[in-house]
Amino acid sequence: MISDIELLKLLNNKPETGLKMMMDNYMALIYTIIFNKLSGIYSKEDIEECVSDVFFEVFHYKNRIDLQKGSVKAFLAIIAKRKAIDMYRKNKNNQHIPIDDVSETLYTMVDEVADSILLKESNLLLIDAIKSLGEPDSEIIIRKYYLYQSSKDISKNIGLKVNTIDKKVSRCMQKLKKILGGIL
């Protein structure tokens, strides 16, 4: 799989190739997000059109993707959710939705809220586990996995050798697995 930086360069330098690469890598994810929101309300063709709209919009706004804020995958997922919600609202305003679909939608919303709460709780557990590593280990892990800094950049910022950073990352990941009961 191509890195986000390389994908953005490809989108700018060779747009057709970059778009094809992005679609090859993320089509299944985007289709799944949209299908989960719109199935039972829209036809397969409408869902596929919505997926195409996502890639068109991401391609159109490719210069706005800021890898400091998140990955291309996250950007695509957000656009997909927004497009699906817009399409759902459009249908809601123009068409009668059977009561079965409403109850299914409510169950889906409840599931999404529950998933969101569980994700937040697990993120808090992970953050607490990272903090428990102490300094400089917690800073190294945060820089490596949340800020996506390379070992070389981390080395420059905190004044340790690159190989020391790599060893600490490896040891910290083992510690985190133990702290979190093997889940990581």
Image (cartoon, grey):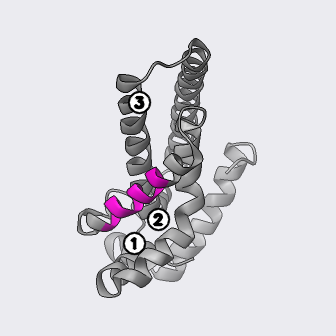
* Camera-nearest label, 3 or 1: 3
Task: Name the kind of residue labelled 2 in the image.
Answer: Lys
Kind of residue sitting beneath label 3: Asn
In-front residue for pair 95/72: 95
Residue at figure coordinates x 41%, y 63% from the top left:
72
- Looking at this view, name the residue that lies furthest to the right: 182
Which sits in the foreground, 15 or 140? 15
Q: Quadrant of the N terminus?
A: bottom right
Q: Are marks 2 and 1 in contact (CB under 8 Å)?
A: yes
Q: Position of residue 97 (x, y in %)?
A: 50, 19
The first of marks 2 and 3 along the sequence is: 3
Q: Which residue is mark 2?
A: 144
- Label 2 – label 1 distance at C-alpha: 8 Å
Task: Estimate how packed mark 2 is, as few (under 14), some (14 to 19) or many (20 or more) residues with alpha carbons within 10 Å.
Answer: some
Residue 122 placement, left or right of 3: right
Q: Position of residue 139 (x, y in %)?
A: 42, 57
Residue 20 in the image, given as x and y percentages of width and height: 48, 77
Please state the extent of the stretch shown in magenta in the rendering: 49-59
Residue identified by numbered label 3: 91
The answer, for residue 135, to whether it is visible in the render is no
User: Who comes first in sequence, dot 2 or dot 1?
Assistant: 2
Q: Residue at x 47, y 60 (%)?
A: 73
Task: Provide the residue designation for mark 1.
Answer: 154
Q: Secondary structure at mark 1?
A: helix
Q: CA distance from mark 2 to mark 3?
A: 43 Å
Mark 2 and mark 3 in contact? Answer it, CB < 8 Å: no
